[in-house]
Amino acid sequence: MSPNHPARAAGRVLTTGAAALTAVLTLARPASAHAEVEAGTARALAENVTLTFVSEAESDSAGFTRIRVVLPDGVAPGDITLTDAPTGWKLKTTADGYTVAGPVLKTGVDAVHKIRIRQLPDAEQLVFKTVETYSDGEIARWIELPNGAVEPEQPAPVLELKSAVADAVPPRPSPSTRKTFEPSPGARPAAETAAAQDDGAATGPLVGSVVVALLALGGGAWWLARRRTSSDAG
């Protein structure tokens, strides 16, 4: 046996161990498919910005049928417009976001759609939690947020925003974000108005009862006076 044989054997062991470790780490990694969001103008307070959402297909037997997106704070469902989507897919707004859905896409085909936002909020980043539905009922939830140094297995799409330009105008409230009732200056709140009406309704019968009682007392006093006068005259 040559003196270099133990060194060659140790080298083969290390190489085999490294290969096995690489295989284990590869199998332990989460699926590469994910959901993404991009923007042509990723800047706070930018107006009429088009966002592109890409849901990568990860099923070997089914295609996408629906994508649901939860909008971040500062973006109302009424502020968005669908500009592009798979053929036959339609947008429907929800209380906290929207869905785009339609005919089943072919297996392995990514779902890509675009929306236009009236104005981006004044923020550093926007998180768009996304839920994907396949034709076989499988659901992929890309809703997790980073937690310190731990990388989430199913991260939500995040859009990083640059700072707003100096002359940017803050967003105006859209019809879907305005308060349902806002009293004008000097106006009485509805609760006070209702209370006043209730007081009036309760006061009316009371006043009427007092008037009737006074009339009855007055009539009784007049009758007694007449009786005494008749007695004296007799």
Image (cartoon, grey):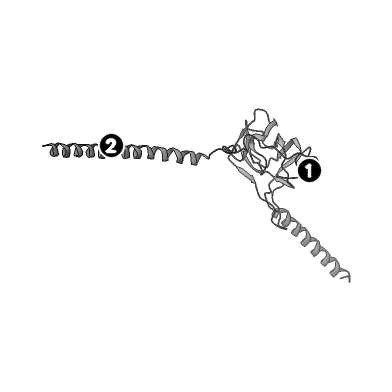
How many badges with numbers are in the image?
A: 2
Q: Residue flagged by tag 2: what amino acid is it?
A: Leu
Residue 127's image quarter?
top right
Q: Is residue 8 visible?
A: yes
Can you give x and y, in whole percent of width and height, for residue 143 in the image? Answer: 65, 47
Name which residue lies at 83% across and 65% down.
11
Instruction: Say above or below: 20 vs 199.
Output: below
**Would residue 90 be found to the left or right of residue 193 on screen?**
right
The residue tagged 2 is 215
Residue 208's image quarter?
top left
Between residues 51 and 119, which one lies in front from this camera angle? 119
Can you give x and y, in whole percent of width and height, for residue 220 in the image? Answer: 22, 39
Residue at the farthest right position: 3
Using the numbered discs, state the Cα–Cα distance from disc 2 to disc 1 in whole angstroms: 77 Å
The residue tagged 1 is 164
Between residues 224 and 67, which one lies in front from this camera angle? 224
